[in-house]
Amino acid sequence: MTLQPVSSRIAFAVATCAYTGYSPIAPGTAGSAAGLLLIVPLRMLGSPWLDVGAALVVFAVGIWSATVVERQLGIEDPGIVVVDEVLGMLVSLLWLPLSWPVVVAAFLLFRVFDIIKPWPAGRFEHLGGGLGIMADDAMAGVYANLVVQVLVWWRPGWMV
C-alpha cells in the first residue's frame, strides 16, 4: 500500500469539501449546503467584496483540486468532487440579502440550473479537467443569482 503525497490528500479534502462529497445521498446537494456554511461567516464580516474574493479563491483552488482528484481516480468529473457546488452557492448569493426566502430560492434554483445546465453552462462542462468541473457550476450560480435578483427587485417585501 502506498501513501498519497500530502498535496493529493489536501486536494481530496478540498475537492470533496472536507469529505462532504462522500455523502451516500445527494453529494452535490450536500456540497451546496456546505457552500451556505461558508457564506454566512463571510457576510458577518460585513464586506460584499469578501464574497467575491472567496468565490475567486474557491474557483482557483477548486480547479486545482478537482484536476488532481480527476487524474488520481481516472474518472471524468467524479461525483465526490463538490467544491464546484460550493462555488455555485457563493455565486448564487453574491450581492443578495441572506434572508430565508432568498437563500432557499438561490439554493433550489442553483440545483436546478446545475442539473439542467442551460447554455453556456453545458458547454463549459466540456472544457475538461478542473476548469470544466468548476466553470459549469459557476455559470449555474450566475443563472440562479440573476433569477433571484429579479425576484428581489420584483417583490422586495417577499424576499427580504
Image (cartoon, helix red, strand yellow):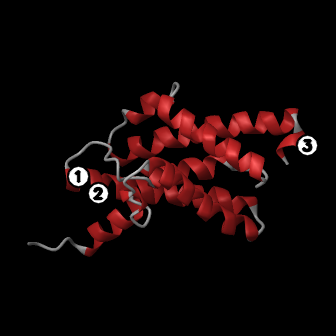
> Which residue: 60% across, 64% down?
38
Tag 3: amino acid: Gly
User: For mark 2, what is the residue?
Assistant: 68
Decide if residue 64 is in sight here: no
> Which residue: 47% across, 38% down?
136
User: For mark 1, what is the residue?
Assistant: 71
Q: Which label number is shown at residue 116?
A: none
> Which residue: 36% across, 48% down?
130
Instruction: Please provide percent x and percent y for residue 7.
Output: 29, 70
Under circle 3, the secondary element is helix
Sequence-first disc among 1 and 3: 1
Q: How crowded is mark 2: few (under 14 residues within 10 Å), some or many (20 or more)?
A: many
Q: Quadrant for residue 156, please give it.
A: top right
Q: Residue furthest top?
A: 119
> Which residue: 21% across, 53% down?
73
Tag 1: amino acid: Arg
User: For mark 3, what is the residue?
Assistant: 157
Decide if residue 93 is in sight here: yes
Under circle 2, the secondary element is helix
Tag 2: amino acid: Val
Instruction: Please provide percent x and percent y for residue 37.
Output: 60, 63
Q: Are marks 1 and 2 in contact (CB under 8 Å)?
A: yes
Q: Which of 125 and 27 is in front in this view?
A: 27
Under circle 1, the secondary element is helix
